Image: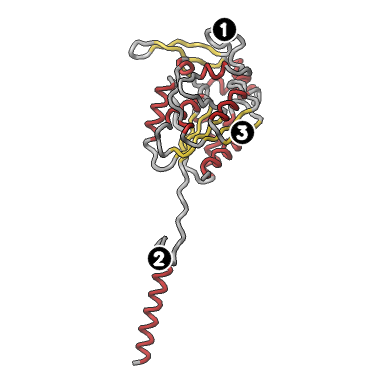
């Protein structure tokens, strides 16, 4: 009879210990919490490039366990491109780190406004306009762009203008970097002539209206921002980048790189994105 009592007591004690060991997070003996899911990184390209320009960054972020998407930027106009991206962001569940390169910076500036899921904005040699600013007006404030050697020219001298007609009959103009200017303007002559020529052939144009369209309420006024300044940028003057970064109170790094930073320095871009993603 005594043995049976001891056996029953032992079983009860063992059951109690097991329950304690498997206690839910927040219980007295089980305080460990599961690791928070990493935010989704959304990469937005700019003019004269496409989503493939992020390939080196995508590879590194995926290796580090981040969910990544790089949607196509329509490059048709600031308001319409921003509306497109804003709708795209609604399909993503959970926190987002929103990254823009070049013109893509102006798109994320507008698309993220009012979206509580966007936890950080990351500008990579990018426009970060204030309300009612145009991209053309920002560039004109600072010397250093190689897009034109004639400020009075109706079309920047490094660009080709290609008229187009919309299905509704309205017309517009697409802007391409001239093939013989692409290596200088976009790459600061950092890649070989062969590689630059291939990129020039596959560049995506931007509608001219995008440069003259006023920006809306900027998301960087309410969302923490990070900025990578490219010292050797021949498209957006580095001084303009520093000005926009300072105005946005962005966490800023500077590297010796051309405008096409995602192509030439994907490691530096990835490090900055991950700093934004892990900031508290």
Q: Quadrant of residue 71?
A: top left
Q: Position of residue 100 (x, y in %)?
A: 50, 30
Q: Residues within 10 Å of mark 1 (few under 14, many from 20)?
A: few
Labelled pair 3, 1 in contact (Cβ < 8 Å): no
Q: Which mark is residue 166?
A: none
Q: Is residue 210 visible?
A: yes
Q: Nearer the viewer, residue 238 or 14?
A: 238
Q: Position of residue 57 (x, y in %)?
A: 55, 36
- The residue lying at 62 percent from left, 26 percent from top is 258
* Residue for badge 2: 23
Q: Are marks 2 and 3 in contact (CB under 8 Å)?
A: no
Of residues 133 and 164, the one drawn nearer to the viewer in this rendering:
133
Identify the residue position indicated by label 1 in the image: 152
Give the mark nearest the N terminus, 3 or 1: 1
Between discs 2 and 1, the one toward the N terminus: 2
Instruction: Between label 3 and label 1, give the one nearer the viewer.
Output: 1
Q: Mark 2 and mark 1: span between their CA atoms?
A: 73 Å
Badge 3, how many Cα within 10 Å: few under 14, some, many 20+? some
Q: Which residue is mark 3?
A: 265
* Mark 1 secondary-structure assignment: loop
Q: Is residue 91 above or below residue 128?
A: below
Relative placement, left or right, of 270 versus 3 is right
Q: How many marks?
A: 3
């Amino acid at each position: 009879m005594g043995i049976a009592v001891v056996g029953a007591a032992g079983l009860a004690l063992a059951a109690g210990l097991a329950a304690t060991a498997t206690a839910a997070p927040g219980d007295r003996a089980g305080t460990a919490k599961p690791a928070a899911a990493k935010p989704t990184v959304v990469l937005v390209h700019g003019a004269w490039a496409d989503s493939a320009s992020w390939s080196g960054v995508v590879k590194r972020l995926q290796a580090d366990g981040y969910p990544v998407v790089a949607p196509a930027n329509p490059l048709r106009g600031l308001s319409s491109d921003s509306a497109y991206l804003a709708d795209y962001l609604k399909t993503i569940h959970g926190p987002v780190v929103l990254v823009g390169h070049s013109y893509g910076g102006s798109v994320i500036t507008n698309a993220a406004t009012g979206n509580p899921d966007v936890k950080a904005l990351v500008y990579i040699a990018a426009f970060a306009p204030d309300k009612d600013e145009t991209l053309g007006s920002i560039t004109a404030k600072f010397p250093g762009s190689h897009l034109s050697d004639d400020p009075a020219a109706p079309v920047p001298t490094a660009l080709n203008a290609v008229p187009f007609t919309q299905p509704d009959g309205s017309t517009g103009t697409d802007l391409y970097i001239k093939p013989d200017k692409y290596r200088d303007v976009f790459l600061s002559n950092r890649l070989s002539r062969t590689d630059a020529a291939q990129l020039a052939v596959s560049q995506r144009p931007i509608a001219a209206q995008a440069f003259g369209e006023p920006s809306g309420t900027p998301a960087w006024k309410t969302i923490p921002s990070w900025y990578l300044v490219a010292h050797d940028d021949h498209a957006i003057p580095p001084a303009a980048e520093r000005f926009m970064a300072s105005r946005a109170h962005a966490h800023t790094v500077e590297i010796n790189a051309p405008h096409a930073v995602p192509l030439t320095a994907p490691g530096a871009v990835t490090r900055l994105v991950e700093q934004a993603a892990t900031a508290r």
